[in-house]
Amino acid sequence: MTAKECIENGRAVLGIELGSTRIKAVLNDENNKPIAQGSHEWENRLENGVWTYHIEDVWSGLADCYADLLKDVKAQYGTGISRLAAIGFSAMMHGYVACDEKGELLVPFRTWRNTITGQAAEVLTGEFNYNIPQRWSIAHLYQAILNGEPHVKDIKYLTTLAGYLHWQLTGQRVMGVGEASGMFPIDIATGDFNESMIGKFNALTAGKGYPWKLRDILPKVLTAGDEAGKLSAEGAKKLDVSGQLEAGIPLCPPEGDAGTGMVATNSVALRTGNVSAGTSVFAMVVLEKELSKVYPIIDLVTTPSGKLVGMVHCNNCTSDINAWVNLLAEFAETVGAKVSKGDLYTTLFNKALEGDPDCGGLLSYNYFSGESVTGFDEGRLVFARTPDAKFTLANFMRTHIYSALATLKYGCDVMFKQEGVKVDTMYGHGGLFKTKGVGQGILAAAINAPVSVMETAGEGGAWGMAILASYMADKAAGESLDDYLNNKVFAGNKGESLQPVAKDADGFDKFMERYVKALPVERAAVETL
């Protein structure tokens, strides 16, 4: 059927993802092809030392994004949306949403970007013998306990932003296993929260007098393909303020942007991996076996279907590049040059390819916020060079692209070089890869492995979430997520692959030697600026 018929017959599928800088909606047809989209721009706030988004901004942004989708549908097809085959919601991974018995937030949403749970993460990692990153929900909860925060006793439900949205729209306290694995460790054998570790946590908090045990306040864990409730009448009104959308639409389990990135790049099978590079950057590799020991810089999470994944997550990626491009755009405007921001990015990224493989002695730290991979609770933006460094525009841009991937390389080197993890291809997606061949080639040099970028990579996590909704609605009996993606979504599309260039890989290694040696410069900047 045509796209218009698909929409009018209620066969279209919707995915919405609340990312760090944009809320995006993608409407897919029956063949998982995008046919319309909407978006809403937003930004996090640093309030009282905590990175957050106001919950009112979540709801107004979600409604505006959906209204923008309706505009696109009306403009393209002259129709509206009353019914859908399925819906899925995802959001920036993990963080801390603690609610009382009325469903109200007890404290402002604490995002993944916060590095304020170091003490808790260290204690829990030791207790569990399992790496607990600072952004995980359980680290936030235990830090609140260590801080003696009064709200903890009133918690009735602990979730993430994706889980909160799903709950408010369906009434169901559930979570997809991929996102759940960033709340609390998952037992791969059961696909549920690790019971022995839950027992250890309850023992840690036994003397505190809280009226809850950990299981009481955590969501139910679901796997990709499970039905996770239906859109309520109240939920339909929150999503579509125009009142067109009907209640009763089935929803798939909510996921985080890590899981939707895996789906959008077809990297949920063993020995596949992906790198998502935008405001933050993370690499995920589906592991063939457990790692030999606990690494504080490697998180163990799962795919949306429950396979074990090694993850390196870095808080900072493209924000500093964006700031420099904005400065150069201002210069261009000042001298009367007419150039679009998109063209400026393309020109500057391509210019980076002319730079020296080791960036000519230039150095940059892109730490807008803390960076736990390298041990920083706070960040400062630093650009440095020696008097004899080759200070050219090409090296300047190359340095900032290297800097965007430097902490990722720092962590990936542990997986690939120390643990011998094997990956057949890494798939790149996100803003860093928009200029063809540049970010892709530099990432290949950073991890010394082939990197592929698919034509669909630009569709992003909202598209991946829509696919998860389709999988729930349309999968055949016993059909795995791997098979569904290979046969019904990507159908042999492997993307365009770039092999690492030896001189660039060597150059990145030399840059990293300088980067690691000069980390005290960043430390001094944090302490003195």
Image (cartoon, rainbow, N blue to C red):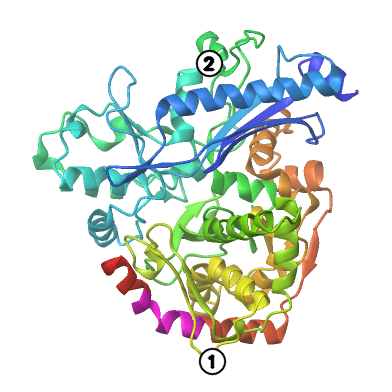
Please name the residue that numbered disc 2 is placed on.
Answer: 238
Tell me if 372 is positioned left or right of 442 in this view: left
Residue 388: image tag: 1
Give the extent of the magenta segment: 512-521
Crowding around mark 2 (Cα neighbors within 10 Å: few <14, some 14 to 19, many 20+) is: some
User: Which numbered disc, 2 or 1, marks the residue that appears first in the sequence?
Assistant: 2
441 to 19, vertically: above or below:
below
21 to 66, vertically: above or below:
below
- Regarding residue 305, the answer to whether it shows in the image is no
Q: Quadrant of residue 464?
A: top right
What is the x, y in percent for residue 180?
A: 44, 42
Closest to the observer: 306 or 45? 45
The quadrant the C terminus occupies is bottom left
Tell me if 80 is positioned left or right of 519 in this view: right
390 to 426, vertically: above or below:
below
Query: Residue drawn at (69%, 87%), measured in percent from left and top?
Result: 503
